[in-house]
Amino acid sequence: MIFSSHIFLLYFLPVFLLLYFLAPVRWRNAVLLVASIVFYAWGAPDFILILLASTVANFYLVRAMHQAPRPALKKLYCTLAIVLCLGLLAYFKYANFFVDNLNALLALFGLSPLPWAKVLLPIGISFFTFQSLTYVVDTYRGVNAPMRRLTDYVVYIIMFPQLIAGPIVRYTDIADQITARRRLRWDECLQGFYRFVIGLSKKVLIADVIGRTVDTVLASDLTALDSTTAWVTIMAYTMQLYFDFSGYSDMAIGLGRIMGFRFPENFDNPYTSASITEFWRRWHITLGSFMRNYLYIPLGGNRRGAGRTYLNLWIVFLLSGLWHGASWNYVLWGAYHGFFLVVERFLSRRVPLLDTRRRHPLFVLPTFIILLVGWAIFRIEDLPSCWLFIQRLFAFQFQPLDLAADPQYYTTLATALIFAFITLLPLGRKMQQAAYYTNYRPATHIAVWAAACLLLFFCLGALTATDFSPFIYFRF
Amino acid sequence: MHRLPKILCLVTISLLLLTILQGLTHFLPLKPLKGAYLSAERPAFTPQAFASGQWQQDLDHYLKEHHGFREPAIRLYNQYLWTAYHRSTNPGAVAIGQHDYLFEPWFVDEYYTGCYAHFYPDSVPDYEKDQVFFRRISRLAKLQAILDQQGTHLFLALLPGKERIYPQHLPDRGAHARSQRLFGHHRAYDFYRQCAPLYGIRHVDICHCFDSLRGRTPYLLFTQTGTHWSNIASTYAFDSIMRFMQTFGPAIRPVKLGQPYYASTREPDADLDDLLNKTFRIPTERNQYVDVAVADPAPDSNPSLVVIGDSFFWNILHNYPIQELFSNFRYWYYFSTIYYDTAHDNVANIDLVEQLLQADYVMLSYCTVQLYNLGNGFVDRALLELCYDPDEIQAVRDSLANAPSTLSVDERMERYLEQYFPALAEEVPTKRSSRLTQLRP
């Protein structure tokens, strides 16, 4: 089930909210657990048992680890739990990729390929694997004690708002919120509702609209693409991805807020970054934080000299790329970002102007251009096509745009660009603060609530109307 | 006021629950959406369908078409698209032309490329495409001759298309669009207009008539937001058609046309605008209408009429009390679905020979855009069934079905009809089906 589906918006969510609000506080986790199982089983009935079984196994392994009397035994249980999490991820997400590449290699030497039945990818596995890992590692490190009740742990792992696409919620950030449920605060519920509607609007009214044209252009003959169209298309994809992903995060955070949880923020105006280093502090923040805490620092971080720091950065970003998808273009995308991070780190120590610790607004544009090229690598899986597209970007064969050809696309793209960069201005920052975090006065609350309801209804219209194409009469 | 957030939250949940209730019970009567579409059926639950995810997918599709307050939600969004971008959410059925004129997309295609250009694949050479039309008109002439001998008057009504009458309002496709025209005859209409007299086809060219009236009438020949000829224009046109019919066939009860008057838009004069399913209609000039009255007294018997054609005839059915003018009226829509016949619903189930012999008039009523497929298979089938017995036809079909070919049996029958049924190669076939002698000894 996805948040922008009719079944979720019009049936699942209202019924869930009714039951959740009617349930006594001590039963709310149970309602959330059942709803989350239904939510996941709806989209991936084949995998719900795998998800539950691995979660239960992880819970008991971590409990055993916590109770183990000797450090060696603790370490063993920790290793087992990590192997279980990563093993599932490796099998479901990367086995096909590995076998395909191995078979290509075997074919190169004239050997027959390995017989292999394709493995289907359970939705959300990348996210719940990482959450499980934070539970294992944080408990092992003694940051938190393990959960006492299995149901609480399962709620943490499969809580439906963030199960499919994050944010990746660290165990330490939410443990107390799950185990010590408090009474609902209606103003927070309302804030959550507003946040959910903002997220839905970002997805339905901006990302989906832009995405339709982007898909059409990228499916066309790339050799015939002029540079203007190529740049506009990749800029549009950049906006599509941001508004889609951050919209989904907004919906997750909003739903969490309605239920009384505070999930971490996942985006902070990433395209206003003045360096790639800053970008990764603003884009998919919970992934960046996970990678830093559970990979970069354990690898040694920046404590083992410059050379090792650069290597660690590269490893982190290669793996980060691979985490996004089992395909070479994601690896390349990770390497591309890793390269710029290393270069920035190298130069920022030597050229004061390029010191990433100091923000230079002038560098927003070059950073954005680097990101655009990176998103081309990310979007176009087929590497020769990706190379062709990048060639078209830099062919400098610019043609005037026919803005009248698709006014909705260009208007939406312009709107997206304005929203993406508006916080470069103080006024923009104020507007964002007002939309996301303000506790309104009563009169404003009513106005904002009415606008949110209208926007929700409007999104519903967009979702329903898009494929509704009747004819006057049936024709033969 | 500290209770306000709680009240707003509860109202929000109530509104969401109300949507479910509306979807289930439709307790609030809402103006239905316009247009024809295949509605999704509620999927039957099976464990297998659930496990594969198909049931969930089908259910979501079903709910998309049946959720509460769907109608105003769609209208609101479509109104936004129209107001902000002049865009249609239904580009498959509505093309937006200049000056807010609306067209069905195939009328636009007809103007720029010729509809029969995309009816055949590019791989088919031009001369073969031309041959299709020559075959059709030649067979039509033979059918007309045979039916004349039986007292049934077949005729062709060439109806105008909006693209022909108001090309200045078509969407602009750029300077190169018109170069895509094909063949010696760019349009099916041009072909029939020129060749019908040469083959002796009885026909009335309403399209030519509209062409000459363009800009000279106080009313619109086609409305701004409708796909068909305007209500008033079609009323006058059918009056002319009936006069034409009586030049070669039995008398029809006279009708009296009233004085034209302005009135708010009636169906189907804004059918394309309605199809956009917006909140508000596009503002247009007021349309004129004229009332039709059948003069008394009724004759002893009215002539019978079969109409084979496209949707343009619906306008006439809106205006004329057709069953008071014609007995045994039948509308064989695209020679497929049957209207005004309680006994049959599809031409596949009728005794075509019997039906044709019962008719005084058979009208082929096609607008410019649909002429590329004149008759929709009627001419071949009628010709064959009038001249050959069912078992003879079936024998040929069986042999064709057993012979390997890249073409289907129907395609081969259409292409090589005279080869498989040699009697049809004669200028006026003399062979007759035994059904004919059974029905008219």
Image: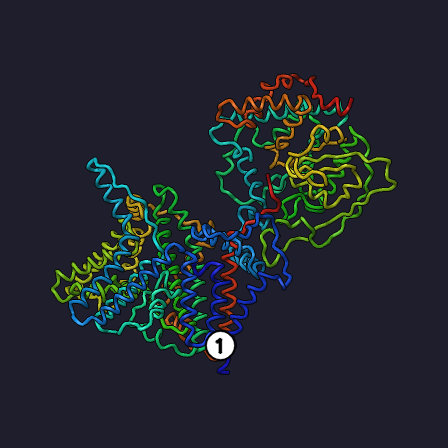
Left or right? Give the position of B311 relative to B440. left
Q: Position of residue B319 (x, y in %)?
A: 74, 45
| Other-residue count near label 1 (Cα within 10 Å), few / some / many at <14 / 14–19 / ≥20 | few
Task: Please report the residue visible at 25 percent of the width from the left and 58 percent of the height from the top.
Answer: A86
Residue type, mark 1 in image? Thr
Q: Is residue B233 above or below residue A302?
A: above
Q: Residue at x 52, y 74 (%)?
A: B10
In this rendered view, identify the residue nearer to me: B106 or B354: B354
Q: Secondary structure at mark 1?
A: helix
The one nearer the camera, B98 or B60, is B60
The residue depicted at 53 percent of the width and 55 percent of the height is: A465
**Residue A455 rendering spot, x and y as whole percentages:** 50, 65
Is residue B152 among the parts visible in the rendering?
A: yes
In which quadrant of the rendered image does the N terminus of chain A lie? bottom left
Horizontal and vertical percent position of residue A287: 29, 63
> On the image, numbered disc 1 is attached to which residue?
A444
From what the image shows, is residue B297 above or below residue A426? above
> Visible in this render: residue B88?
no
Left or right relative to A475: residue B440: right
- Image coloring type: rainbow
What subunit carries mark 1? A
Q: Quadrant of residue A305?
A: bottom left
Q: Is residue A345 above or below residue B51?
A: below
Residue sitting farthest toward the right:
B297
| Foreground residue among A473 and A268 | A473
Quarter of the picture containing the C terminus of chain A is top right
Q: How many marks?
A: 1
On the image, the x and y values in percent for residue A120 come to 34, 50
Left or right: A46 as drawn, with respect to B9: left
